[in-house]
Image (cartoon, grey):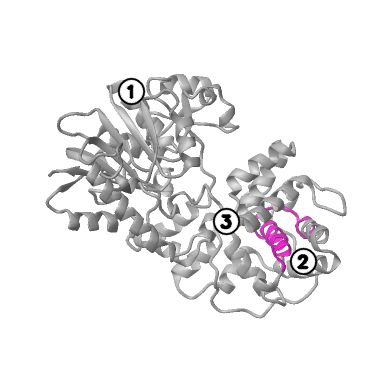
Amino acid sequence: MAPRSAGRARGAPRRGAGHVTSGRRPRRPGRGGRAPARRGAGRASDPPHGPRDGADPARRAAYDVLRAVADRDAYANLTLPRLLTQRQITGRDAAFATELCYGALRGQGTLDVILAESSSRSLERVDPPVRDALRLGAYQLLCTRVPPHAAVSTAVALARSERGAGAAGFVNAVLRRVAERDLDAWVAALAPPDELGRLALAHAHPVWIAAAISEALDGDLTETARALAANNERPAVHLVALPGRIDRDQLVAETDGEPGSLSPCAVRLPGGAPGDLPAVAGHRAAVQDEGSQLVALAVANARLDGADSRWLDLCAGPGGKAALLGAVARQRGAGVVAVEVSAHRARLVRSSVDDLPVRVIQADGRDVGRHADLPEGRFDRVLVDAPCTGLGALRRRPEARWRRAEADLAGLTALQRELLTAGLRAVRPGGVLGYVTCSPHRDETSAVVEWARREQADRIELLDARPLLAPAAGLGDGPTAQLWPHRHGADAMFLALIRRSG
């Protein structure tokens, strides 16, 4: 969430919000009264208005996805596109629905702090469908140029349609109080006294995530603010041109895209639905962030001694990196074994690798040495793209920051250590392993690598990963490398390259 500017288009996001606790509490705003006019409200065309007894299709779609996320643990980035297609919502209405849905989910923590301050009852005691109507209305009031009367009346209509007149009156009263301040004023009034807590509230992050990002940036709060803000920006869509199937220049010409700034295989798209592109439908290209491309290519291109024909992707689902590795392997006469423990994700990997020299095995990656297809010390290159908190891809998954808990780290880091240990058993002496996470949290990145180095000091050697991610700069002090959305425009991928020496 970010404060509105007069030059923003309808529904554009404000600078971050979110954190589930506040600092000092001001006197509650008075009841009633007309909501103040918003900056620039007259300069933006109104969003669509529906019948008096319900919300317009765009708002209804956004609301229904919020309910699916809350009730069924749905993923908004998967649910919303399907719903928009089913309801034939397109163009500006689809863009508006997307902004409201993703914005309300990203900003949930901060919106809840503000709503709690504006409500006569605890937010936990509010009926969940009514709570989601409040969040949708508050997001419009604080974070878009939607006229206040439209933001309030449509949220009231949603509450009435779901829970009746009593809920509608409650939503009307709460949102009128919310409308008495803009987002900056609310943050100033409710933020805790420490700067990190203020940043967490202002940029819609739980405090533990903001603290982890700050630690990974060596405590630089100015850069932390930039990193948090970047997590609230809409990421560009990139394709990977699969080597041997299509080259990047050809893909640029076919898609009207432009070359990516980091990966030699990347094409940045101007917009649209990438799944409809012939190159994607024909499995010559795939949707993949530049950060994911870079780390996969680094594992494929790291120097090693001796044979280079047997590659292993130990945690392959859903298959994007396996496909890129397979395409490169085919050019070099190598083959890839792709391991995935989940049956569903193993099917996704198979559909991604198509006719590439990739053999997909449904197995637990920790079973190296215990599974017939996963012998010890036989693979020249190994990728361990370990399950993690996903804190490096928060801009893609708007609800993820509020679903994760700091308590999740213990189980994940134990799994990461086990998978890295298995990967090191799989790689042959002289071979190379890449340890990758889509997270900048030090517990999941450098701490795991340092643990492995202590455990196997006489068997492994850390390589400098940074040159293999060129032209990306600002990757850290080495030898590991950390990408960042605010520095590189890529997901926050971490890479450690390890050579097995004995």
Q: Nearer the viewer, residue 387 or 371?
A: 371
Q: Position of residue 363 (x, y in %)?
A: 38, 42
**Which residue lies at the image location 40% right of the left edge and 57% below the top edge?**
223
Query: Is residue 405 shown left or right of residue 174?
Result: left
Mark nearest the camera among 3 and 1 is 1
Local crowd size for mark 3, using a 10 Å CA cut-off: few (<14), some (14–19), many (≥20): many
Disc 2 or 1, which lies upstream in sequence? 2
Q: Which amino acid, mark 1? A: Arg
Q: Can residue 400 be seen at all in this image of the molecule? A: yes
| Residue placed under numbered mark 1 in the picture | 330
Amino acid on which the number 2 mark rests in the picture: Val
Quarter of the view holding residue 384: top left
Q: Is residue 194 left or right of residue 310?
A: right
Q: Position of residue 261 (x, y in %)?
A: 40, 34
The secondary element bearing badge 1 is classed as: helix
Provide the residue designation for mark 2.
171
Q: Horizontal and vertical percent for residue 437?
A: 37, 49
Quarter of the picture holding the N terminus: bottom right
* Secondary structure of the residue carrying numbered label 3: helix
Q: Given the image, on which type of amino acid does mark 3 rest?
A: Arg
Range of magenta residues: 127-152
Q: Which residue is mark 3?
A: 106
Nearer the camera: disc 2 or disc 1: 1
Instruction: Indicate which disc, 2 or 3, sits on the residue closer to the N terminus.
Output: 3
Identify the residue at horizontal 61%, vertical 53% (top origin). Answer: 103
Q: Within the magenta stretch, is there residue 140?
A: yes
